[in-house]
Amino acid sequence: MLDVQHIEDGKKIKITLVKSPINYGDSQNATVKALKLRRMHASRELILSPNLRGMIHSVRHLVRVELAEGA
């Protein structure tokens, strides 16, 4: 997994849900929903910001983070 703490803000990243948020508590389930990852292996490309970095940190065991193509 890519460590988002060492990526500068404004870069485009790809987030993929690789583990189900079931049985991980309501706050982590809500974070996955806020990232709009609805199904297993669903991916989104987002621009990294401090808010997004915190969300990824709270569910880092459920998602895979990569630099997006052309970032």
Image (spheres, rainbow, N blue to C red):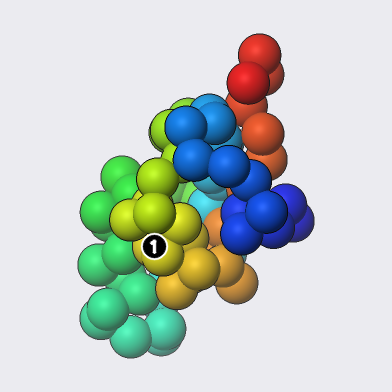
**Residue at the farthest front position:** 8
Residue 19, compared with residue 1, is above or below; it is below
Identify residue type, mark 1. Answer: Met
Nearer the observer, 40 or 65 = 65
**Residue in the image at 63% along x and 21% along y:** 71
**Residue in the image at 61% along x and 54% along y:** 4
Mark 1: give few (<14), some (14-19) or many (20+) Cα within 10 Å. some
Nearer the observer, 6 or 42 = 6
**Residue 6 image offset from top left, x and y in percent:** 67, 54
**Residue 18 image offset from top left, x and y in percent:** 60, 56
**Residue 60 image offset from top left, x and y in percent:** 56, 67
Residue 41 appears in the rendering? no
Residue 26 appears in the rendering? yes
**Residue in the image at 31% along x and 45% along y:** 36
Residue placed under numbered mark 1 in the picture: 55
Residue 26 placement: quadrant: bottom left
Q: Secondary structure at mark 1?
A: helix
Image quarter of the N terminus: bottom right
Question: What count of labels does the image hold?
Answer: 1
